[in-house]
Amino acid sequence: MSGADSIPQELIAIRDRIDALDRAIVELLSERFALTHEVGLLKASRELDALDSRREEEKLRTLAALSEARNLDPALVRDVFRRIMDEVVRNHQRLQAKP
């Protein structure tokens, strides 16, 4: 046997669960960005800064603690959320730049 025929059923089942989680993560990211878009609109309408450094640092500390409690690498989680937050700030800046 070779190829797909040699893949154990248990491995296929685990991969199916991983695929489902990946889809859920993408859905959650979509929902998160929809909410942060609302935040960006509010900030733009009230002429608030696109970047809230204090909120970001507080959020990253909370996520690091949550990561440690779940046996995840806090640096990895911080990096992932730093990328997300950077994109959110760019989106907020674009909203503020619109006439």
Image (cartoon, rainbow, N blue to C red):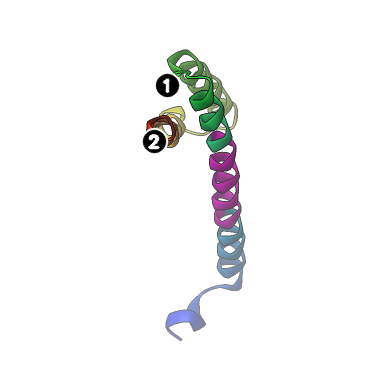
Query: Which residue in the structure is indicated by mark 1?
Result: 51
Residue span colored magenta: 22-36
- Residue at image position (51%, 31%) is 40
In contact (CB < 8 Å): disc 2 and disc 1: no
Query: Which residue in the structure is indicated by mark 2?
Result: 94
- Residue at image position (46%, 86%) is 1
Task: Find out whether residue 25 is within the magenta segment.
Answer: yes
Secondary structure predominantly adopted by residues drawn in magenta? helix
Q: Amino acid at mark 1?
A: Leu
Please indicate whether residue 95 sits to the left or right of residue 59 in the image.
left
Outermost front residue: 99
Q: Amino acid at mark 2?
A: Arg
- Quadrant in which residue 92 is drawn: top left
- The crowding category of the residue bearing disc 1, from other C-alpha atoms within 10 Å (few below 14, some 14 to 19, many at least 20), is some
- Quadrant in which residue 68 is drawn: top right
Please indicate whether residue 64 sits to the left or right of residue 76 in the image.
right
Location of residue 60 in the rendering, given as x and y in whole percent from the top left corner: 48, 23
Location of residue 82 in the rendering, given as x and y in whole percent from the top left corner: 41, 31
